Amino acid sequence: MLRTRIFPRTTHGRVFLAIFAICGLLVVAGTSDWRPVGLHQGYAPVQPIDYSHRLHAGELQVDCLYCHHGARTSKHAGIPATSICMNCHTTVSAGFDTTLAERAKALSEGREPKRIVSPEIAKIYAAMGLDEDLEPNDVGPRPIPWIRVHNLPDFVAFDHSVHVTRGLACAECHGPVQSMERVHQSRDLSMGWCVNCHRSHGVEASMGVSPDHVKLDPSQHVSTDCAACHY
Amino acid sequence: MPTSRKTDWYRSPNECASDTPCESAEFPYPTPADKGVDRRAFLRLVGFSFAAAGVTACSRGPAQTALTELVAREGIIPGRAYWIATTSWADGSGGGVLVRCRDGRPVKLEGNPAHPLNRGGLTASTQASVLSLYDDHRFDGPRLDGHSTSWAAVDEAMRTKIAAITAAGGSVRVLTSTVTGPSTRAWIERFLTSVPDGRHIAYDALSCSALLDAHAEAYGVRALPRYDLSAARVLAVFDADPLGTWISPAEYSAGYAAARSPETHDNHAMSRHWQFEGRMSLTGTRADRRVRTAPWETTPALAQLAATLAARAGVELPGPAPKIDALRPAVRDALEDSATELWANRRDALVLCGSNDRDAQRLTCWVNHLLSNKGRTWDLDAPSQQRLGSDADVEALRQELLAGDVDLLLTAGCNPAYDIPGFADAVSAAATHVSLASLEDETSYRATIVCPEPHELESWGDAEPHSGLYCTTQPTVPPLRNTRSLRATLARWTGDERDDRDLLKDHWRDHLSNRRASQTEPFDGWFDSVLERGFVQLAPSPSTPPGLFDPTQAAGALQRAGRGQSAPAEGTLRAVLFPTVGILDGRGAHNPWLQELPDPVAKTTWDNHASLSPATAETLGIRDGDMVLIAVVTDDGSNDTTRPTLELPVLVQPGQDEGIVAVALGYGRMGTDRFTDIGPEWIEAIPTVRPGDTVGVNAAPLLHFSNGAFAPDALNVRLTPTGKRRPLASTQDHHSLAVPAHLAPPRGAVRDAVHLITLPELNDDHTYAPDDGHGTSTELWADDHEPRGHQWGMAIDLTACTGCSACVIGCQAENNIPVVGRDEVQRHREMSWLRVDRYYSDRSDLGPGEVDVVHQPLMCQHCAHAPCETVCPVLATMHSNEGLNTQVYNRCVGTRYCANNCPYKTRRFNWFEYSKPDRMQNMVLNPDVTIRSRGVMEKCSMCLQRIQEGKAEARRRGVPLKDGDIKTACQQSCPTEAIVFGDLSDPESRISKQVASTRAYTVLEELNVKPGVRYLADVRNRPGEEG
């Protein structure tokens, strides 16, 4: 198909080759954040609300599935609807310490304690279209633009429910979220990382699944078929 | 055991003879490789690729925000599909639909298996209607004199107008298509009683007016019989397409297939199907015996049949026996034979007639009466209401409008200015015209006021497709546009401010709930349960019961049938207008899926055409793609200047009668130039339609009002070739399985992709045994592919398949298959994963020009020895342990080796980035399926996402997966259940039983690729001499 040599064996050709290679290196070097394409391990974006998983999941021991209930039944664990925040934050409007301090101050001053609303929780109210006294505000509801931390490419289909219902702990993939002030991507979530786990967890492997369950349907093996995730 | 008869099947009459010979058909345009690449070109390409890769690859993607719901809705979990039962009139039949919704929006329509009408099947046009929901050309808010306005302003203007009309005693006309919804009907009535001279006129663009009128004369009730094709042992169809477009295709197809499955009856009995027609209809392609009958022969043929049956029944003819000489001998003989068969099965026979000629319908009534099949194969006690329109009424309205006698015309759910010849002027003649269209069309564009109606999927409603079968329509998504239903609009104008849901619910409370069997259940709970199911069977509203058969009119028709029917004069042809499966009467014209759906018979896309028989085309010296002018001629042979001349490309249609030219209706719709840039943008792109032009040409002006109905086949036309050419975007030659002549093996290249056998061959003689290839059973990958768990497979019953192409649209909706536009289709780049190959075989032994037709849905065959897998250099196509051939998009580098090596030609390459951001239609995309990007190969995955979802659901619930839990998209929507998917490793599964059938074979068995898809031979109920 090629009618001539691409790089003639002359000085001219070698110079050309060198320029070509240098250009390539420059392009690579120009990208400051050198890492394998697409892996975002450690990614910890600033969220619109300074929400602390350490406080909620760690200190207060709220179950992961309380907010991310989709993880048990759906592909997506889901970012909770604002109404789920409001289940608690209708009454809890500020941090424990601040509330205690205000109560102590009120007691000493001989008055009723004031309702304190922390600026972060006020953002939840604002999202619901409420002011600090939980009355409708003028702006109206506006959903919170959370930023996705764990973001698989579109060509990967990951189903939370099948992993969670087989007893896989959330931390296996998401790391120690209960100790993270701001959530970051703990694992690299690369295909090799997925496949390693799929390889090492055979049908009989202890994933909290009873052997009877497995016997029900032998095809429910942990698959390493491409088709398990790519469609 | 002898093998099956080898037949020369071909897909187009000009196969190997056209200007694109078969050998080069796979690559019709020269590729860069053909031109050769020099050093400079190579360096340019390398430099560009390297730079492009460097620029795009090393950056982190933009941060993705995720907006969550404010208030979690009960039962709706992001990422999980939920289903809503509703009713769709998209194909004019009112079938039950289950709408698959994801994250608050509908993404796919599927048939409701519990619905008594369509029983889980759904036509292509209904399935595609989900795309029309997201049509960004729909009106957003009302318009007054061409300007956007508010509902309050429109209501105020209308109330003033109505008050003025009431004061002056003026006339109000409401023109709609058939309305069956009891609440909507009630509101139309209530509105019309509030004005002094109000009338409601209904018409159907796909008219059954003559059929209704004939029943009114014969039985005293103007009603459409409910036909039960599953009970018909002998079925004779005259000029109707019940499997494709006539009245209720999904319902009829299900019944038809049930009566024709050789396995379900004792002694492999099948119904016998006679088809008398001039053009090649979808139903005609499935006939056991198809008799070419020109339109002018239909009424005489029915007269002859009636006379013969009357003689057998010993019924004395009223008056002398008619002398019927308009029939050709072949038709006469066939009628004699069919009469014998009909008479022998008289209580289980059925005669259908789709002609809009009243005499033909009178005679059909009489024939069915003589066969004493009422109550067995058809029923008038609980009739169908799918068509109620009257052509005579709408013609009378046209006259009234032209005379200036109408003060207020309200059109809803119809497009009369397009459908009815001369109605555009009539619409403009109304003093005030209010249109309730959803798009700007020929009618709403002329309206004074436009009150847009919502799409079915975002509105409340009800329907009664069969008497007593009450169906509900409910929103699946909050309104996407500022619209209001006909019911709510009329309620506002009569001073009722209730919202649409309450209007519906209150009507049901007041008028329908008293008819339910148990009155103890509270209404609210009952109504919710009806909404949940989508339908309820109630006692029908009281109406006049049908009387006894009155033969007076039929006798008159019999006497007339011999006269006044004649072939067109020498040099002229009879124009026959017909709806296509996708576009129907034009309602699908704004839907790109339907525009790109190859017509099941003609295999053309993005155009209508003048269909001619091969003999006629030869006489005229024209071939596919030649432009002709079609001019109506009057009785004296001169051109009719009152009717427009159509300019259309020709398509040669095997099996069509010589005397006719068939033209599809529904094309040439205003605003279809929106598809100008539907395809990819690149330097050689040719727009699908020129700006200001339309897709196809409107043939409706060739409808002729005679005898109280619009006849689609009454005018004679003269064809004049213009010498220009417009090559059709036809897919019939694409992806051929034939071996190119220069590569054919010495023993010849007969490849029987389809097997057609007769019932005796299957039953008595046992002469049919599928080809076992060449005795090779070498295992190519014995050690490599370890089968584990399920082994997925598919079986397609060609006896049940009608070719209706519902599966094609089902697959398109499920798998996010892009539309590529007319130009790309012509370049063989249509993206459909599932195509329906249509094969012809000459049967000159039955008469000149006779053909057999077989339809074959073909998708990736999931070969165990897949030729594509061995040639992929990057292992992007792999075999799964469950027997599937999988395509991994992120690995694919686009060498296209796999497509070249695929013997079935089912792989599709993304030549362009077909997905476009910021389109409202993107909301229809299935979130479970990857959107493929440019440079990637794709193909049928056997709905892998559904398999995974089925398995995941079983895991979540801790139960084993049952046979039938997983249905592929094509299988789910198939009205005839021709497609069966399942686990081959389970001996009790339906698929295992199908595969074990004596009819099962694999396509191109001789290649030993061991496909996972089996076909069941097409069986026709033909005695030996016809076989």
Image (cartoon, coloured by chain):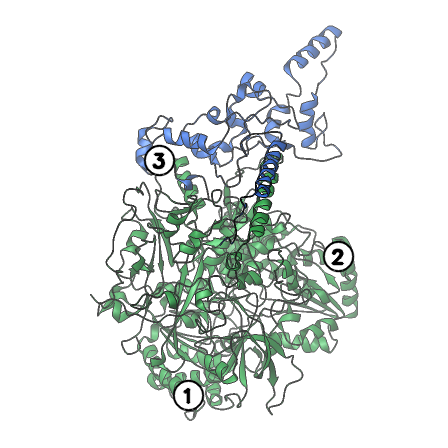
- The crowd level at tag 1 (other Cα within 10 Å; few <14, some 14-19, many 20+) is few
Residue toward you, A174 or B632:
A174
Q: What label sits on residue B328 in the rendered view?
A: 1
Q: CA distance from mark 3 to mark 1?
A: 67 Å
Q: Quadrant of residue B52?
A: top right
Sequence-earlier tag: 2 or 1: 2
Check the rendered structure and report the hue given to chain B: green
Disc 3 element:
loop
- What amino acid does circle 1 point to? Arg
Q: Which residue is mark 2?
A: B155
Marks 2, 1: nearer the viewer: 1
Mark 3 lies on residue: A221
> Please, which residue is most extreme toward the front here?
A10
Q: Badge 3 local density, few (<14 within 10 Å), some, or many (20+)?
A: some
Residue A46 point in image, percent of width and height = 64, 26
Residue B83 pos. (x, y %)? 50, 46
**Residue at disc 2, secondary structure:** helix
Q: Point out the frontmost of discs 3 and 1.
A: 3
Mark 3, chain letter?
Answer: A
Taking depth in this image into account, of B317 and A38 the one nearest to the observer is: A38
